[in-house]
Image: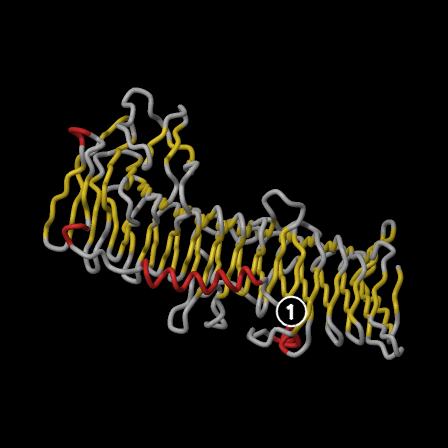
Amino acid sequence: MAQLPQWVLLQRSIWFAALVLTLAEPHSSLAQLIPDTSLGTHSSTISTNGLIDTVNGGVRTGGNLFHSFLEFNVGTGRSLYFNDPGVTNILTRVTGVNPSTINGRLGVNGNANLFLLNPNGILFGAGASLDVRGSFTATTAAAVKFSDGSEFSATNPTVPNLLTISVPVGLQRGIQQPSATIVNRGTLSTGQDLTLAGDRLDLQGQLQAGGNLTLQATDTVHIRDTFTEPFLAQAGGDLTVQGDRGIDILALNHSTWTAFQSGGNLSLVSDGVISGDARFASQRNFEVRPITQELATFISLYDPIITSAGDVNLALNYTGASLLVEAGGNIRVQGILTITTPDTAAPFVGDDAILNTRPGLILRSGQTTRRYGTNSGTVTGSSTGFGIVPAPGITLNRRVNVANGGVVRLTTGGTGDIRTQQIDVAAGEITVNSGGSINTNGRRVDTSTSNGNGGTIRLMQQAMFLPGIYLPLVMTFLLMGARSQS
């Protein structure tokens, strides 16, 4: 079994200890919401009706409404709504020293997008939910930047310039700002985009966006399910998980559950270690890539299953358990694949079940029907079939190493070509089934062993093209205990 780096194991223990201290309910209902005085005569005001608090006031300029709080929390069973006077964006900053704890409902009376900035951290408890028809952004950044160069800052609070402030274009981290975490244990859903952007993200529960879902950390993203509740990250548009220094995903307590679903593209992005034990399903393209390096580092102890209606591009070196990728378009792997163990956890379908007992790699491109997908139909907003090309193929830019007795199965639908480099599976099975051509680029395809008792190599082509003639056929080369060189 692949071993996680020591820093990853230490980090996992630190996460739990920190959460015990940070998920506590604010100590007094009077301390739930305290506006500050940084907006002068335009300070935010709170009205209460039973369990519902409503925020009014603030500074309005153009399509933006600004609020500023010393303390910002929502208690268990309570709801907090911002009144929308007809603006595009409602921006709320927290200028105090405490994180915000959201244990109830946070919403907007209207269609405006909602931004919440707290550089000290934001904690969404198990009872947290959103009622936002537009987009919602929660961030530990110090400020929101605008297209004219101005900022709405939580660490240097000033009154927004009523004459120049315009469209928000990005987030700004403070130079001396300490690390802060966004924690989710609730069910957060939005009508449009949902963005969680922090120094660190610690996520459970469910995250659903009608548009794009962005989970971004300048440090690490940490994702878990529980025995009682599956984790879900679902986007009608693009789904991006980016941890600059690492991504740590383990969401396998519900074996048939697809934790990551996108109606658009699905991306895992990091310059650190990406540990990905979950199912991923994209209705467009799927990619794993680094930020600045040539290749990402991807490890898996148990169960990565990747399904894409479009193309799959893996700019990575992979080490871990059996790997299965199926795509409607092309599959391209740019780095080295090292398969060390079977995947004993996954409920594979049909002949894929061989991966439960033997280490292996299964890649299928050009698949109009895929075996592993979403939990209940198509993701809202999807466009199934995007990315499918007339002859989707498989390209392996570097070598494949599979532990003794393992399997490699490469299959293209239609007339897709298969291009590989060296493949080594001692005493195992290699099957290459191409609807077009097979090209190993002069590299070895090898199932031999040191004592001469090798495995099996099968090279199959479904069709051959001659000038003016199309000949459907099956060409099979069966080599027992041999090395194939093309």
In the image, residue 159 above or below residue 198: above
How far across and down, in percent of the image, does residue 315 sit? 65, 51
Image-quadrant location for residue 276: bottom right
Residue at figure coordinates x 30%, y 46% from the top left = 133
Residue at figure coordinates x 33%, y 25% from the top left = 165
431 or 416, which is in the foreground?
431
In the image, residue 352 above or below residue 195: below
460 or 101, which is in the foreground?
101
445 left or right of 366 in image: right
Residue at figure coordinates x 38%, y 52% from the top left = 182
Label 1 secondary element:
loop
How far across and down, in percent of the image, does residue 259 sit? 47, 62
Image-quadrant location for residue 141: top left
Q: Please indicate, yes or no, whether residue 171 appears anywhere in the rendered image.
A: no
Visual colour scheme: secondary structure
How far across and down, in percent of the image, does residue 273 sit? 58, 56
The C terminus lies in quadrant: bottom right
How far across and down, in percent of the image, does residue 266 sit? 53, 52
Q: Please indicate, yes or no, whether residue 1 appears anywhere in the rendered image.
A: yes
Q: Residue furthest left?
A: 49
Q: Which residue type carries mark 1?
A: Ser
Report which residue position mark 1 lands on: 322
In the image, residue 167 above or below residue 279: above
Image-quadrant location for residue 396: bottom right
Q: Residue furthest top?
A: 163
203 left or right of 363 in image: left
Circle 1: is it few (<14), some (14-19), or many (20+) Cα within 10 Å?
Answer: many
The N terminus lies in quadrant: bottom right
